Image: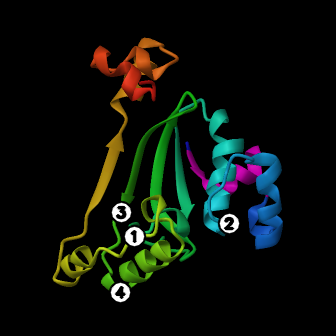
Amino acid sequence: KRLKMLDGLKEIAKIDVSKLTDKELEKLDKPHIPEYDGPKIRGLLIAELFAALCEGTLVQPTFLIDYPKETTPLCKLHRNNPELIERFEAYINRWEISNAYSELNDPVLQRKFLQKQAGEGRAGGTEEPVDEDFIKAIEHGMPPAGGLGIGIDRIVMLLTNQVTIKDVILFPQMKNTAMGKQ
C-alpha cells in the first residue's frame, strides 16, 4: 500500500492538517507529542504527529510517501505539490525498515533550504554553516542522486520474530553500547 502522510493522518488519526492553521497545529503537539521539543515548524509538526499517532498502525507492508518539505532539505520537491517532497519510508510490522528520496539538484534552491535549516538551528541539532562545497559541486554539474537506506537489523528482526533490536545486533560485545548503555 502507498499512503500519503497527510492522508494517513486524516484516515488513521482523524486529523485533517490541511484545514488547520499553524497555531491550531501547534496546539496539537502538547496532547499528542508531549516529548517533542523541536522547532514549531508546520512540516516538522505534521511528521511528528504522524509518527506518534499513525506509525504504530502500519502492520502490513506500507510505503509512506509525500512528506512535508521541511522534513528533508536535501530532497527534491514533489512534482505536483511544492509543499511536499519526493521521499518514502517503508514500514512492516510497525517498523520503519527503509528510507529513500530523490536528492535535490538545484543549487539555488538547495542553498536556500540549507540556509533556512541552519538558521532554525536544525542542521545536526545545532546551528551549522551551509556546506558550500556541496553547493559548488551541484553548481558544477554533480549528477542527480538518490539513495535507499535499508535497516538490515529491522529485516532480521522481522524474519526471526525478535522484538528488540539488541537480539539481532551482529557484534554482541557492542550490544550495550549500541543500546545506549555503557
Q: Secondary structure at mark 4?
A: helix
Identify which residue is drawn at 29% across, 59% down. 146
- Residue 138 seen from this side: yes
Image quarter where the N terminus lies is: top right
Q: Position of residue 145 (x, y in %)?
A: 25, 64
Residue under circle 1?
128
Few, some or many residues within 10 Å of mark 2 (<14, 14–19, 20+):
some
Tell me the amino acid under the disc marked 1: Glu
Q: Nearer the viewer, residue 131 or 57?
A: 131
Few, some or many residues within 10 Å of mark 4 (<14, 14–19, 20+):
few
Residue under circle 2?
40
Tell me the amino acid under the disc marked 3: Ser
Few, some or many residues within 10 Å of mark 1 (<14, 14–19, 20+):
some
Q: CA distance from mark 4 to mark 1?
A: 18 Å
Q: CA distance from mark 2 to mark 4?
A: 25 Å
Identify which residue is drawn at 29% across, 16% down. 173
Q: Nearer the viewer, residue 116 or 150?
A: 116
Identify which residue is drawn at 19% across, 77% down. 137
- From the viewer's perspective, is 80 left or right of 20? left
Residue under circle 3?
102
- From the viewer's perspective, is 25 left or right of 77? right
